[in-house]
Image (tube, rainbow, N blue to C red):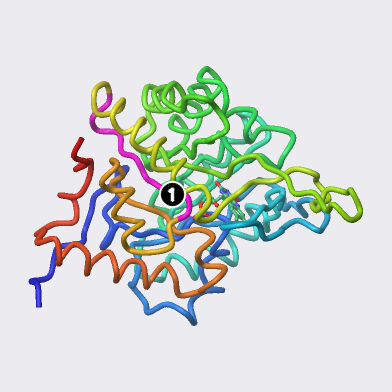
Amino acid sequence: MSPACDMAVSVGGIDLTNPVLAASGTFGYGQEYSPYLEPGAIGGLVTKGVSLKPRQGNPPPRIVETACGMLNAIGLANVGLAEFLAHKLPWLAAQPGAVVVNLYGESIDEFAELARRLGAQPGVDALELNVSCPNVKEGGMAFGCHPGAVGEVTAAAVAEAQGKPVWVKLTPNVSDPVPMALAAAQAGARAVSLINTLLAMAIDARTRRPVLANVVGGLSGPAIKPVGLRMVWQVAKALAQSHPTVDVVGLGGIMSGADAAEYMIAGARAVQVGTASFTDPGAAGRIAAELADYCAEQGLSRAEELVGSLRI
Ligand SMILES: Cc1cc2nc3c(=O)[nH]c(=O)nc-3n(C[C@H](O)[C@H](O)[C@H](O)COP(=O)(O)O)c2cc1C
């Protein structure tokens, strides 16, 4: 048997026991998945996006399966900040593993207020700004496609976050994600997470109607992994040159430990598991275990040795 590898990583201003996090919107607020994971099996989780007020989201149908993935147009349905603080965070904060709160505002002021109120919570380890949701009209992807807006919203959140690390979740719906990543880094982000879902649609040929009530939605799952790898690689290379202390968190289509390793080889210091949790609620824990086996088989003493180790 290969000797065990140290799986701990420091990423975006926090320490994780292993590099695998559950991705926002695919793991609820953690408690829903607790029957399926050993405590401490993953490095932590990113919550469903929290907004100031509760949101119903878009009307159904709002998910549909596609070849090698799925579309969703949830529209950021969530319990809202007050309910999150009163009933979701206390449970989460008592669990092993990092708590990264994904948040969403319709304006820069709303992002700043969420950062201030969440940053004040001892149970919150880091904030992840969702500037990349394709399924909402205000904010979301509208911010994430313009470097100036990404910089402004990041700077506003960093100023209010009371020292809590701010991560920025980037959209793949741009031809080049590097200017967005650089704008976030310049404005004080400690990490960028990429990718969010790809804008897409499904049509029912029989009825000639869109399958999703929202008409368009976001594509996730194995179909998007090659896009995610390419973008993580591009962004990690650019950040290494200009902002070497700003980390990349990679996601998009991770289904196995090997997929997670690929993202780390491309330059991610940690990864997130999203859609995989819908086909197997224990996927994130399994992927963390597979990644540890892979690292041991590779003869690594620390998982961090994988980061950016692509041989070209
Ligand atoms: C149903 C669903 C809901 C999501 N909700 C959020 C969200 O609230 N905030 C966010 O930043 N990303 C959200 N995402 C995007 C995922 O966190 C992730 O970036 C994307 O699905 C790609 O990873 P995957 O292929 O592993 O699922 C959501 C994805 C899905 C499928």
Quadrant in which the C terminus appears: top left
Which residue is at the far bottom? 35
Number of numbered discs on residues: 1
Check if residue 251 falls in the magenta segment. Answer: yes
Residue at figure coordinates x 59%, y 63% from the top left: 86
Q: Is residue 276 above or below residue 152?
A: below
Residue at figure coordinates x 61%, y 42% from the top left: 104
Under mark 1, the amino acid is Leu
> Residue 208 location in percent, x, y?
89, 48
> Residue 67 location in percent, x, y?
61, 57
Residue at figure coordinates x 54%, y 36% from the top left: 171
CA neighbours of label 1 inside 10 A, class few (<14), some (14 to 19), many (20+): many
Can you tell me whether the CB of the residue at mark 1 lies under 8 Å from the nearest atom of ligand 1? yes
Q: Which residues are magenta?
A: 243-253
> Residue 110 location in percent, x, y?
63, 35
Q: Secondary structure at mark 1?
A: strand
Q: Is residue 176 above or below residue 264?
A: above
- Which residue is at the front of the view, 42 or 14? 42
- Which residue is at the front of the view, 218 or 22? 218
Left or right for 242, reference 92: left
Left or right for 18, reference 193: left
Q: Quadrant of residue 144?
A: top right
Check if residue 146 falls in the magenta segment. Answer: no
Which residue is at the far front? 205
Quadrant in which the N terminus appears: bottom left
Which residue is at the far top? 148
Residue marked by disc 1:
251
Q: Is residue 142 above or below residue 214?
A: above
